[in-house]
Image: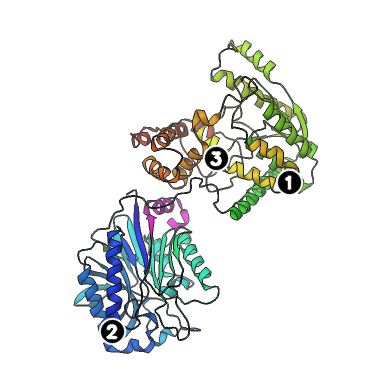
């Protein structure tokens, strides 16, 4: 479903050196995971005998019991489609190899040996095992079956491709998973036995998370449990499932009982990210063998959380850090541009709304950094037919506190003269009525900048640019578009960030944050905002969600609709579909505005500038995208 499969990571209750008992526990876990539609399940390193058996590994009795236990697992799971990866010791050419066996439908599909054998501190694994990093194109006879054996194995079913590395392999300078991923593996499984010492759990999680990001893959990790020997150290059964730098599920609680975690892996997302990543495309491709899986269990529904505001960090502390970083990007980008031009004066239209407020705060920060005169920031409020006293007052108070030059220019006479010139009735409240005002404001700002020896700073944001919710050569145009990389859902948090650093600004900024988003271009009664943007084009939080998953993840409209329905409780599916259709139509038809948008700093992974990372013809048809939603 939508390129998503369910995977599981398990740390079974372990009876050290008793493969028969361990097999019983593993079989029970496999059956339960299969009932939950898991496609693949991972077990720890040497799961049938225990990692800490030490020199008992040399005992023929133990190894034979292990093979019998594996045979029992094959027999009891032959009717199941789930793929199981189990840590096992393999004897081959009179050498022992710490390995992982892959099984499905009662058959052995392949065995992967460990490449890097630790022999340091508390680990003396070279005493028992040999490195398998040079074993390729080899086979072993396992339970009377000729089985592919080597580090050159990938396992595949349609778009799902996985590879295996074992424990220490992840800690190596060049993990095998890097080559596996560049050769096509979009999921890496790691059966492990990692002990617990101070700080290791956090470092281990960071390794898994980082490798999944570097490899543009999912990474599934399973470590041995507390059933291992406690002679010199203990094992906790740490379980981690990560996807592209994000930990989806983790269980690091120490327990004597079996533990299993599940997560939905988005194979399509990984594939889309790889297609556009030039570093991935230029990485080495190994000559690996591909083992075809018979099938994979399919999920019945998506069991995965989606952040309704993907541009906004969930963690409040992280959010503060991101806002600090963005404010610096905006400020220093502006400083660089002004230095290039050789001026220190700026002109900005201030409306008392979110966008102009953020742009003004960013300009002010730039001037603070450079110790430039705040009076060289010329803030112009231009009330028109729809301007309310609330927004006008907010604009004035903000400028007064910041100490910038404030000018108020009523555009109604200019707009009325324009109506007269083009023979447009002032009673006709169509788009012309609105756009005349928008262009009048831009004309005033441009001419004011010429007069003052300044540049005009644009205030339009990424969400408006995506929807084309601006007037061509009106608010669409400026000399530097400071907010062009920031979506609407993030802007309010950036403004909140500034309230944390200035008690003087707090009241006016909170008033601005509580004011409905509106262009204020239509007449009003009783001094109340009549034209609420989100009533016309839909909630910005939905459009930002659509934008992120359409551009960043490359998802189809059908998939976006499905995950939006999961992410948002406040909207029903029909409402989401309605606004998604509008988003698609506007995104395609308004590209011509983006093709000539002014310079502005990119602050996140998405920019719609034709000079940054979005190139699209203005004439592309959107019909096939809408058809998915019918």
**Which residue is depicted at the point 25% across and 84% down?**
64
Compared across the picture, whether 151 is left or right of 20 comes to: right
| Of labels 1 and 3, the one closer to you | 1
Compared across the picture, whether 551 is left or right of 401 comes to: left
**Which residue is depicted at the point 39% across and 33% down?**
622
**Which residue is depicted at the point 29% across and 80% down?**
19
Q: Where, by quadrant of the figure, is residue 432 drawn?
A: top right
Question: In this picture, which residue range is highlighted in magenta?
Answer: 262-286
Q: Where, by quadrant of the figure, is residue 248 drawn?
A: bottom left
Q: Secondary structure at mark 3?
A: loop
Residue assigned mark 3: 609
- Asked whether residue 135 appears in the rendered view, the answer is no
Residue assigned mark 1: 502
Q: Where is 183 relative to 496, above or below?
A: below
Q: Position of residue 487 (x, y in %)?
A: 56, 41
Residue assigned mark 2: 63
N-terminal of the two: label 1 or label 3?
1
Image disc number at residue 582: none
Q: Is residue 263 magenta?
A: yes
- Asked whether residue 157 appears in the rendered view, the answer is yes
Front in this rendered view, residue 193 or 31: 31
Q: Is residue 309 magenta?
A: no
């Amino acid at each position: 479903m939508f390129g998503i499969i369910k995977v599981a990571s398990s740390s079974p209750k372990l009876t050290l050196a008793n493969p028969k008992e361990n097999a019983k526990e593993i079989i029970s876990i496999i059956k339960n995971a299969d009932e939950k539609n898991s496609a693949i399940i991972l077990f720890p390193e040497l799961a049938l005998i225990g990692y800490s058996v030490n020199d008992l590994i040399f005992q023929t009795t133990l190894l034979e019991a292990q093979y019998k236990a594996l045979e029992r697992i094959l027999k009891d799971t032959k009717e199941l489609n789930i793929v199981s990866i189990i840590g096992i010791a393999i004897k081959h050419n009179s050498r022992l190899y710490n390995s992982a066996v892959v099984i499905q439908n009662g058959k052995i599909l392949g065995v992967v040996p460990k490449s890097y054998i630790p022999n340091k501190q508390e680990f003396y694994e070279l005493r028992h095992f040999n490195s398998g990093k040079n074993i390729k194109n080899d086979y072993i006879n396992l339970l009377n079956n000729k089985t592919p054996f080597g580090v050159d194995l990938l396992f595949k079913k349609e778009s799902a491709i996985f590879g295996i590395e074992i424990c220490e392999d992840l800690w190596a300078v060049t993990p095998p998973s890097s080559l596996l991923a560049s050769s096509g593996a979009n999921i890496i499984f790691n059966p492990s036995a990692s002990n617990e010492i101070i700080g290791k759990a956090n470092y281990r999680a960071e390794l898994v998370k980082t490798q999944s990001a570097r490899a543009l893959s999912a990474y599934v990790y399973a470590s041995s449990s507390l059933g291992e020997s406690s002679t010199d150290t203990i094992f906790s059964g740490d379980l981690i499932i990560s996807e592209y730098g994000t930990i989806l599920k983790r269980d690091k609680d120490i327990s004597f009982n079996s533990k299993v975690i599940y997560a939905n892996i988005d194979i399509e997302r990984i594939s889309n990210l790889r297609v556009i990543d030039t570093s991935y495309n230029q990485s080495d491709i190994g000559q690996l063998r591909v083992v075809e899986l018979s099938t994979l269990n399919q999920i019945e529904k998506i069991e995965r959380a989606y952040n309704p505001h993907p541009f906004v960090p969930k963690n409040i502390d992280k959010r503060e850090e991101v806002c600090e970083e963005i404010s610096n990007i905006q400020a220093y980008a502006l400083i660089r541009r002004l230095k290039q031009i050789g001026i220190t004066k700026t002109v900005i239209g201030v409306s008392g709304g979110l966008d102009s407020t953020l742009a003004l705060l960013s300009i002010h920060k730039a001037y603070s950094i450079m110790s430039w005169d705040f009076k060289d920031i010329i803030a112009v409020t231009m009330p028109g037919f729809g301007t309310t006293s609330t927004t006008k007052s907010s604009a004035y108070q903000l400028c007064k506190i910041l100490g910038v030059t404030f000018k108020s220019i009523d555009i109604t006479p200019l707009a009325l003269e324009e109506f007269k010139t083009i023979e447009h009735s002032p009673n006709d409240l169509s788009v012309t009525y609105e756009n005349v005002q928008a262009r009048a404001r831009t004309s005033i700002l441009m001419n004011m900048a010429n007069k003052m020896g300044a540049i005009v700073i644009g205030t339009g944001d990424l969400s408006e640019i995506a929807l084309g919710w601006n007037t061509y050569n009106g608010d669409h145009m400026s000399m530097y578009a400071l907010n062009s990389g920031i979506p609407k859902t993030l802007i309010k948090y950036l403004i909140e960030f500034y309230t944390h650093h200035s008690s003087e600004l707090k009241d006016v900024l909170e008033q601005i944050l509580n004011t409905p988003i509106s262009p204020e271009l239509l007449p009003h009664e009783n001094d109340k905002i009549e034209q609420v943007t989100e009533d016309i084009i839909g909630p910005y939080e939905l459009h930002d969600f659509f934008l992120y998953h359409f551009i960043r993840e490359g998802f189809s409209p059908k998939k976006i609709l499905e995950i939006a329905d999961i992410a948002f409780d406040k909207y029903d599916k029909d409402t989401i579909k309605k606004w998604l259709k509008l988003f698609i139509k506007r995104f395609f038809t308004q590209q011509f505005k983006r093709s000539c948008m002014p310079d502005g700093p990119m602050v996140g992974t998405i920019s719609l500038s034709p000079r940054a990372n979005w190139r699209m013809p203005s004439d592309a048809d959107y019909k096939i995208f809408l058809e998915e939603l019918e």
